[in-house]
Image (tube, rainbow, N blue to C red):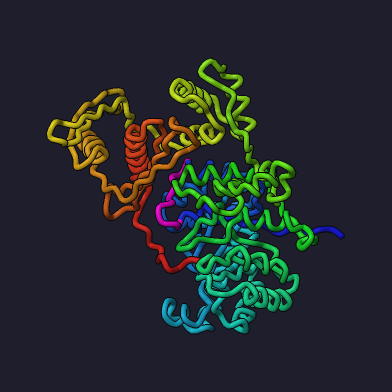
């Protein structure tokens, strides 16, 4: 019997970016899209084109770079949104517009303030207009989990007639239990039959997003919307890696189904997202958490030594994780060996990025005894996704006066000119950031600060992520810094955020999208 393909619709760049603190710059989004294509996702929801010029620009550039995945933009059932989405994906080889409107009584009454017949008319207009830009239109019944199924059948009939080929049934607030989602999908699937593909988008508010998605597959859904590492608003979305590996590992149950995902790219995708967003999966996170393949119990260790299958149902290599990931390269390694190692890790760099990464690798090799694959992934990701270098950190000196007041001396280069200043602060970091503010003339408000160890050992690389607001009327910007010295990494992260802010300043405008209007 031939297996049916379950389409994987990845919304890391749209719903995932709505995680608090997960906003990304254009270069970061492009690199993620390239990795998602390598992962084999069927549809990449690249963003919400009408949200801002920055989002539009990122979607447009992704559309021009991606060839093997459909590139999609979200749009409310509003003409201006749909026009922005259509223009953003116009250059994609395969393109989709995903439009939506709320269908639950509570949303229609209190948010939309519209009658059901008005909602249907708006939905039909949206799909018809979207079809003037693309052939592939997806329609979502926002808050389907709390919608009347009779009304969903009625609106589905109307939008399918208007040209929608995918009907998405999102459990927008993660309210329903898996058996309830399964029953809803089954009834809708039997009603719609082969007129359209049934899709699901399950949020994880009760920790049931993956379970509900798998139950949906068994009841007729043929597309699952999900994110890498389960990123997303509030408690996040169903995690792509868990869904895919559940279908693959339990092939006895899902014998009739398969996905197009290249499982060996799961771990590299997870690390890329974590490095860029600064949001690490919890240690005990299924599939990609640091402890997912760790065995501390003596009984477990004994069993593992005798046969790994005693306590592991997944081979780490199947998701691209090398458990012996020491990089056998050092300060005397040549460029060819370095390039070869990168290619084995899945990185194909242009010459300029390769040269810059190699130089940074040599500096790191001088300071670090052992270099691991994750160190290299972090270094290359940092190099490939950084914003244009408007300001460059040249040097940093830290002092602590006899009266206990921390101070910093910072040297920064701009347009070939070096500028030096010193300052004091409530703490070392505060002194560094205030001094950078004074030199640059841009005062930032630190909203969040995170330090994670990239690998292991006393000489582990520190990966610092900062979230900085340079203007109260504009979104906060994320910056990244990587160094063995945490304070130096912090200074680099702050300047990274400043560079991103300045490079995006001309494109960004205040979001006019209601934060409650998401699927």
Pick the front one: 379 or 371? 371
Where residue 461 sits: x, y (%)? 44, 33
Q: Residue furthest right?
A: 1
Residue, far top? 332
> Which residue is pictured at 74% across the width and 73% down the height?
193
The mark total stands at 0
Residue 368, magenta (yes or no): no
Closest to the observer, 89 or 111: 111
| Quadrant position of residue 412 | top left
Q: Residue at image x 58%, y 73%?
A: 124
- In the rendered view, does 8 fall on the left or right side of 32? right
Residue at 65%, 45% in the rendered image: 301
Q: Which residue is rendered at x = 40% and y = 31% of the image? A: 483
Q: Is residue 464 above or below residue 297?
A: above
Residue 464 located left or right of residue 124: left
Instruction: Judge by depth and name the residue closer to the eye, 148 or 64.
Output: 148
Residue 204 at what x, y percent from top left? 53, 65
Q: Main secondary structure of the magenta part?
A: loop
Q: Quadrant for residue 481, please give it.
A: top left
Which residue occupies the extreme left position in the image?
Answer: 403
Residue 75 point in image, percent of width and height: 51, 62
Q: Is 26 included in the stretch rendered in magenta?
A: yes
Q: Quadrant of the N terminus?
A: bottom right
Tell me, yes or no, if residue 162 can be seen here: yes
Magenta stretch bounds: 18-27
The answer, for residue 161, to whether it is visible in the render is: no
Q: Is residue 153 above or below residue 135?
A: below
């Amino acid at each position: 019997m031939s297996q049916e393909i379950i389409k994987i619709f990845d919304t890391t760049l749209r719903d995932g970016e709505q995680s608090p603190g997960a906003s990304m710059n254009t270069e970061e989004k492009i690199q993620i899209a390239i990795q998602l294509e390598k992962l084999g996702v069927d549809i990449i929801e690249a963003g919400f084109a009408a949200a801002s010029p920055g989002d539009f620009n990122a979607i447009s550039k992704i559309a021009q770079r991606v060839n093997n995945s459909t590139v999609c933009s979200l749009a409310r059932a509003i003409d201006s949104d749909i026009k922005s989405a259509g223009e953003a994906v116009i250059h994609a080889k395969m393109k989709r517009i995903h439009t939506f409107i709320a269908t639950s009584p509570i949303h229609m009454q209190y948010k939309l303030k519209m009658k059901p017949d008005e909602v249907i008319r708006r939905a039909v207009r949206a799909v018809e207009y979207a079809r003037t830009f693309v052939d592939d239109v997806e329609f979502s019944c926002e808050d389907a989990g709390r919608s009347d199924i009779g009304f969903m059948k009625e609106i589905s009939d109307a939008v399918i007639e208007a040209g929608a080929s995918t009907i998405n049934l999102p459990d927008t607030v993660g309210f329903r239990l898996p058996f309830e989602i399964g029953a809803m999908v089954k009834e809708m699937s039997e009603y719609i039959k082969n007129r359209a593909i049934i899709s699901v988008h399950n949020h994880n508010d009760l920790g049931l997003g993956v379970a509900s998605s798998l139950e949906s597959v068994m009841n007729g859904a043929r597309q699952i919307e999900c994110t890498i590492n389960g990123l997303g608003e509030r408690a996040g979305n169903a995690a792509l890696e868990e869904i895919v590996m559940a279908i693959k590992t339990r092939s006895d149950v899902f014998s009739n189904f398969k996905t197009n995902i290249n499982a060996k790219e799961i771990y590299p995708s997870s690390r890329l997202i974590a490095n860029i967003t600064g949001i690490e999966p919890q240690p005990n996170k299924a599939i990609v958490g640091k402890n997912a393949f760790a065995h501390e119990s003596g009984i477990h260790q004994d069993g593992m030594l005798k046969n790994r299958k005693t306590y592991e149902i997944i081979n780490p290599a199947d998701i691209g994780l090398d458990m012996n990931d020491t990089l056998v390269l050092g300060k005397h390694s040549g460029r060819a060996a370095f390039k070869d190692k990168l290619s084995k890790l899945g990185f194909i760099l242009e010459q300029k990025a390769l040269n810059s990464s190699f130089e940074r690798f040599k500096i790191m090799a001088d300071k670090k005894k052992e270099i691991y694959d994750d160190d290299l992934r972090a270094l290359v990701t940092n190099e490939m996704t950084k914003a244009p270098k408007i300001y460059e950190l040249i040097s940093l000196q830290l002092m602590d006066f006899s009266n206990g007041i921390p101070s910093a001396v910072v040297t920064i280069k701009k347009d070939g000119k070096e500028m030096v200043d010193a300052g004091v602060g409530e703490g070392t970091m505060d002194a560094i950031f205030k001094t950078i503010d004074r030199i640059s003339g841009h005062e930032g408000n630190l909203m969040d600060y995170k330090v994670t160890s990239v690998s292991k050992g006393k000489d582990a690389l520190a990966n610092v992520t900062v979230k900085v607001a340079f203007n109260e009327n504009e979104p906060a910007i994320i910056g990244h810094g990587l160094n063995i010295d945490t304070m130096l990494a912090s200074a680099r992260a702050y300047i990274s955020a400043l560079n991103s802010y300045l490079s995006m300043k001309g494109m960004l405008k205040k979001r006019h999208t209601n934060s409650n209007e998401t699927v």
